[in-house]
Image: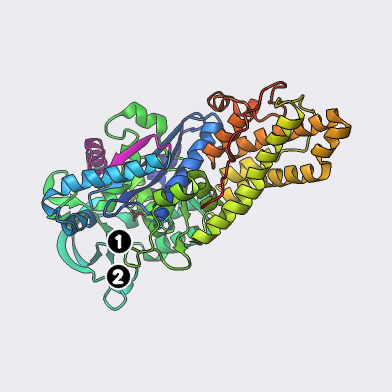
Amino acid sequence: MDDKQKIIETIGGALQRPDISDKPYYVTTPIYYVNDKPHIGHAYTTIVGDVVSRYWRMRGKEVAYVTGTDENSQKSVEAAQKVDRGDDVKGYLDEMSAVWARTWDDLDITNTDFIRTTEDRHLKGVEKFWKAVEAEGDIYKGSYVGWYCVGCEAFLKESDLEDGKCPTHKKEVKKIEEENYFFKLTKYRDALLAYITAHPEFISPNSRKHEIINYIRDHMEDISISRHKAEVGIPVPGDHEHKIYVWFDALLNYLTAVGYGTDDEMFQKNWPADLHLVGKDIIKFHCALWPAMLMAAGVPLPRRVYAHGFFTIDGTKMSKSLGNAIDPIALSSEVGIDALRYFLLREISFGEDGDFSSQRLRDRYQTDLGNELGNLCHRVLSMTEKNADGKVPAIPAEHDEIPWEEYISAMEDLKFGRALDEAWKVIRAANKFIEDEKPWAVAKENPEKAQQILAHLLETLRQVAWMLLPIMPHVSEGIFTQLGLDAAVELQKDFEDATAWGGLVQGTKIAKSDPLFPRLS
Ligand code: ME8
């Protein structure tokens, strides 16, 4: 057996994933840098994580949803210095991290944990992990001479630079010449390629997979994983002159948040992650370095990394210097959290780059949400009040197929736009049904038939509320309530039972209230 073969054989054990059918669904976002407050790009990834979490909860699964903050970074130190907090970096980190946690609370994100890389539980896990990789013989001391970009928190090659600057941040890079610890990333080249081939779902979308395969095959080198005398960071076990490189530390949040190094039972219960959501900017770290680190430590790999695209604002790159970064809280207070969620998932095809435009958000608010969904609810409920004494008539057994299968497959494939299309097919068909059947006219001649039409529409609304639940949870709850249901009780129901046709009980008193999508000022 040659060397390469041997590596693949020895780490074969680490690659085998335990049966995960009964384990909680574990989804993560990147942990964000705290050198600034969250903008709409960060909110995008976090909202998607929330949609996925709510979807799996709706399907009856326990969910672990972790987000958090990446704090052991030179960026944090520089940001603290900028606001004259250089002598109180810890205080600055506490404040900024709280800003991030609060933002997610204000946006009703249902994360089950919020990890900070300055927490003790993280430190313990990182130390354990470092020692495991070291014991495997995959950490060695070498000298690093090269460039470092604080913006990327990454080492760059001479050939990466443009006019001596980082091509992404257009900023000067720092020349670094020091003795560092290195991770034998190249040892895992073949194993990574083999893993990616054997697990087609590991990297999505496909376009990104090719990019990663090229990188692993042709460009990947061993990586420096410590900084000598860095101001912040977790000390290298046994050599406190060095701090662990921020990415090596940050990636480990996915393990430490579910108990690696501190709570074995919790770790066994939750790991491996089902889905790491990331932006395309950090895919190399997640699809090459991260799985190689796990292989080295003998920890099973996550099931899937999904790298979504980046979006611009009205066609321009979002940046602090241009002052066009959008505050998700301000925006959601203008249009409502659910409209913002709807827009992000409908307008930007998940996985691809896109553009964010406030005007298009307002347009979609008025058309898709106000005219189509909002009006449907309003009309059906008003007609029920008028023509059925405000009570649900008997639900007819005959009905058009609700496209649950298509919806489920779209949601599980993270094709949120397609899932919403399915919901909108139902909404549009219901609006057309009203136009065609004219229940208000039928009511005069054949009240019984009018009631049948209304019952059909009311039950359709209930089905729509279920379809929208992961993406527009507040709107769904609003629909349940107006249909005379107790939203909290509905949410406890078994998904299959709840979405079977005919769940609305005859005689239920509806509770029509304010429009779901009031006109924007
Ligand atoms: O990279 N469009 O943190 P970060 C879409 N700490 N998504 C965007 C975006 C945009 N214009 N801008 C940012 C880091 N994002 C590391 C991660 S993980 C172990 C460590 C989102 O604060 C997107 O998810 O720079 C991107 O990957 C992330 O914010 C980067 O956040």
Please state the horizontal and vertical placement of residue 132, each as a whole percent of the image. 26, 41
Image check: 234 left or right of 39?
A: left
Local packing at callout 2 (Cα closer than 10 Å; few below 14, some 14-19, many 20+) is many
Separation of disc 1 and disc 2 at Cα?
9 Å
- Res. 464 image quadrant: top right
* Corner quadrant of residue 403: top right
Q: In this view, does 256 lie above or below 235?
A: above
**Three-letter code, disc 1:** Cys
The residue nearer to you, when weighing 126 against 448, is 448
The residue that mark 2 highlights is 166
Describe the element under mark 1 as helix, strand or loop. loop
- Write down the quadrant of residue 517 in the picture: top right
In the image, the segment drawn in magenta is 109-133
Residue 376: percent from the left, percent from the top? 68, 42
Q: Is mark 1 within 8 Å of ligand 1?
A: no
Task: Indicate left or right for 93 with 483 as reference.
Answer: left
The amino acid type found where label 2 is placed reads Cys
Quadrant containing ligand 1 = bottom left
- In-front residue for pair 19/9: 19
Front-most of residues 273 and 432: 432
Does residue 130 appear left or right of residue 29 in this picture?
left
The verdict on residue 510 being magenta is no
Q: Could you tell me if residue 517 is visible in this image?
A: yes
The residue labelled by disc 1 is 152
User: So how many labels did they put on this image?
Assistant: 2
Indicate whether 62 appears above or below 41: above
- Of 473 and 90, the residue lying toward us: 473
The CB of the residue at mark 2 lies under 8 Å from ligand 1: no
Camera sees residue 235? no
Position above or below: 113 against 141 = above
First in sequence: mark 1 or mark 2?
Answer: 1
